[in-house]
Image (spheres, grey):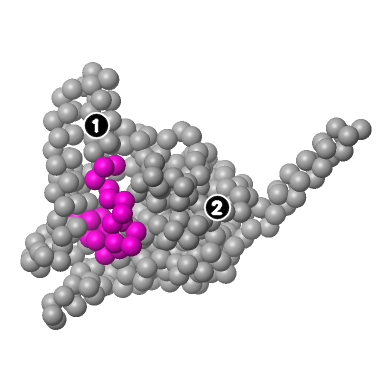
Amino acid sequence: MTGLCLSISEENKTQGEDDKMSQYTVDVMIPTYKPGQEFAELLPRLLEQTYPIRSIRVVNTGKKFWNPAWEQLSDKIMVEHIRPSEFDHGGTRRAMAESSDADLLLFMTQDAMPYDNACVEHLVEKFSLPHVKAAYARQLPRDDCRTLERFTRGFNYPEESDIKDAGDLPKLGVKTFFCSNVCAMYDRRTYEELGGFVESTLFNEDMIYAGHLVQAGYAIAYAADAKVVHSHNYGCLAQLHRNFDLGVSQAQHPEIFDAYPSEGEGIRMVKKSASYVCKIHKPWLLVTLFFQSGFKYVGYFLGKRYKSLPDGVIRWCTSNKMWWEYHGKIRKKRNRR
């Protein structure tokens, strides 16, 4: 009889948790720029998710690149158009979050394709744990993904789910703050409590916020069962530009990154990648790895020291020249001194 009571109690508890999760409202936020076929496929996949989405809010840079037919797919789709000079990785997403009163905010990029119909559901499930206030999805490589990038996807997004908090900092270091707005969900109330995404940043708004989240005593969930297909085949120069922007963002937020530098994690990935290409008997890829890693490090090294660089060097190194023109406030302050 006791066992039956316990069984009923556990069943009621599970049912209560399921009911609570089903009551969460979810708004999806997608900033876009020249959206194309991938975005056209993304919208129906979001509308077909097993967990109901309340709205899909799009902020599109450049109205001439928008297809009005996309808005006809569902009355859940809302779009706002901005000029290229107005876009900011932090500020644009911050404004999108301020437009919503949903319980959970799901930020995605226009080229992240849900692997199945349960992606949103699996992310929502992570918020059944009271200390989890952010959750991000696993990224799977595309069919055309090159060998080294395919390994990097697996390195950063393993098969096992995880929960990370401040207790993991001695072991994981900067990886504790890892969270990707390619597909990441946030508890809105906690987001507002902590001030949300920074108003202006060249890059890395997700990890900056995740760092503040961990420092405030909350946890980040990596949901390996929530999967999106997303990868890029960046060349050496593109890697330099991206890592320059990464270095700048970290230099601008020493409260997060000074105590936990990224260099150690980068070296670990290079070693793992070298071991992998030897294991699969493709040693010639070591040359590619050497050059890519070198360009990444040069970009990151310069980005961390951007305040001492001439304007021309910054414009060449960055992947977002317009941001420096319209949003680089720290740069402007430095020039006035």
Q: Secondary structure at mark 2?
A: strand
Q: What x and y, as percent, mark residue 323?
A: 24, 68
Q: Residue furthest right?
A: 1
Identify the amino acid type marked 1. Answer: Lys
Asked whether residue 261 is drawn in magenta, I would say yes
The residue under label 2 is 132
Q: What x and y, as percent, mark residue 105?
A: 52, 60
Task: Determine the main secondary structure of the stretch shown in magenta.
Answer: helix
Q: Is residue 24 visible?
A: yes
* 102 with respect to 261 (left or right): right
Q: Which residues are magenta?
A: 244-265
Q: Is residue 315 visible?
A: no
User: Label 2: few (<14), some or many (≥20) within 10 Å?
Assistant: many
The residue under label 1 is 271
Measured along the vertical axis of the image, is residue 239 above or below residue 315? above
Looking at the picture, tell me which residue is in the foreground, 240 or 160: 160
Asked whether residue 188 is drawn in magenta, I would say no
